[in-house]
Amino acid sequence: MIQYFKNIDAKTVAVQAPEEGAWINITPPLKQSEFEQLSEELDIPLDFLTDSLDIDERSRFELEDKVKLIVIKTPAENNSINESDAYYITIPIVIILTHNQVITVNSFDNTAIKKFLNTFHNRSPEKRNMMVLKVFEKVVVNFLDYLKEINQRRNMLEQKLYDSNRNEELLAIMRIQKSLVYFVTALRSNELLLMKLERTNFLALNEDEKEFLNDLIVDTSQALEMANIYTNILSSTMDAFASIISNNLNVVMKRLTSITIVLTFPMLVASIYGMNVDIPYQHTLHAFYIPIILSIAISVVISWYFMKKKWF
């Protein structure tokens, strides 16, 4: 679906055609025929429009026939029905700068473009570079927001794990860990993209825009550092809980082994007295109580010894 927006009298107005100074936003469902039509109308390389279809597209920029392409990764909630998949993934946003328009292509719905649409009435159509930088800003804000949500979810799961060792909590932590892997990879790629844009001045920015881009690089570095910290904390947490589970298993096995040893000696005594041979005191009136008393005595002594060693 292709949407056309213009900023008229500080209001976001939807228009029906790609007018000069318009923002063109392409969202799902995506149709090849629409891509081909838009490519012909605005003289845009077709592969620029279809690059967003590849979810693994890396962050980069490119220039072809005086048309500029920028691809940046943004976080999004994962709607997969597979319970082992990550909670969040990263998807590409394609930004295309023509002579008169700014075009964004999204293969998935994402909050960065929605936030930009809500503030589009504050944008100046003639300042196309600042529009691109504002999209970058929404992407960075999205990463920071999702990282805060991930950290809160991680804290809640850790609290649950203190009281329970169920597989559900461990699986949820694994999904968070997968999300952080996506975030770290995307943020590192975005940081390199922004630094390269600053170094090459690909967008021909003025001084104010350069300063704004530098602030975005700092914020992206901060988000990357947060993602790395959360990843390290999560890895340490998983290792700690693995050690706790292993120690708990050792304690349980030690107790079961001690109980087995305690029960083995009474069984040995009963087996000896159950042999079909002559045994001492077999004809006395209390012959039945002798193995019982002997078994209890041995069990008590062994139990006292294990308790002294704190094996129980």
Image (tube, rainbow, N blue to C red):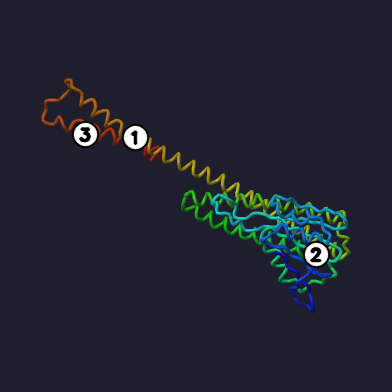
Q: Residue at coordinates 84% horizontally, 56% vertically from top-left? A: 198
Q: Callout 2 environment at 10 Å: few (<14), some (14 to 19), or many (20+)?
A: many
Q: Could you tell me which secondary element the residue under label 1 belongs to?
A: helix
Toward the top, the furthest residue is 277
Nearer mark to the viewer, of 1 and 3 = 1
Q: Residue at coordinates 76% horizontally, 57% vertically from top-left? A: 49
| Residue 303 horizontal/vertical position (percent) | 33, 37
Q: Residue at coordinates 17% horizontally, 33% vertically from top-left? A: 289
Q: Residue at coordinates 23% horizontally, 29% vertically from top-left? A: 270
* Residue to which mark 3 is pinned: 293
Label annotation for residue 1: none
Q: Callout 3 environment at 10 Å: few (<14), some (14 to 19), or many (20+)?
A: few
Earlier along the polypeptide chain: callout 1 or callout 3?
Answer: 1
| Residue 280 horizontal/vertical position (percent) | 17, 23
Q: Quadrant of the N terminus?
A: bottom right
What is the spatial separation of the Cα atoms under label 1 and label 2, in whole angstroms?
A: 76 Å
Toward the bottom, the furthest residue is 9
Q: Amino acid at mark 1?
A: Thr
What is the spatial separation of the Cα atoms under label 2 and label 3, in whole angstroms?
A: 93 Å
Position above or below: 119 against 228: below
Q: Amino acid at mark 3?
A: Ile
Q: Callout 1 environment at 10 Å: few (<14), some (14 to 19), or many (20+)?
A: few
Label annotation for residue 102: 2
Q: Amino acid at mark 2?
A: Val
Q: Quadrant of the C terminus?
A: top left
Q: Are marks 1 and 3 in contact (CB under 8 Å)?
A: no
Q: Could you tell me which secondary element the residue under label 2 belongs to?
A: strand
Label annotation for residue 260: 1
Earlier along the polypeptide chain: callout 2 or callout 3?
Answer: 2
Residue 90: quadrant of the picture = bottom right
Nearer mark to the viewer, of 2 and 3 = 2
What is the spatial separation of the Cα atoms under label 1 and label 3, in whole angstroms?
A: 19 Å
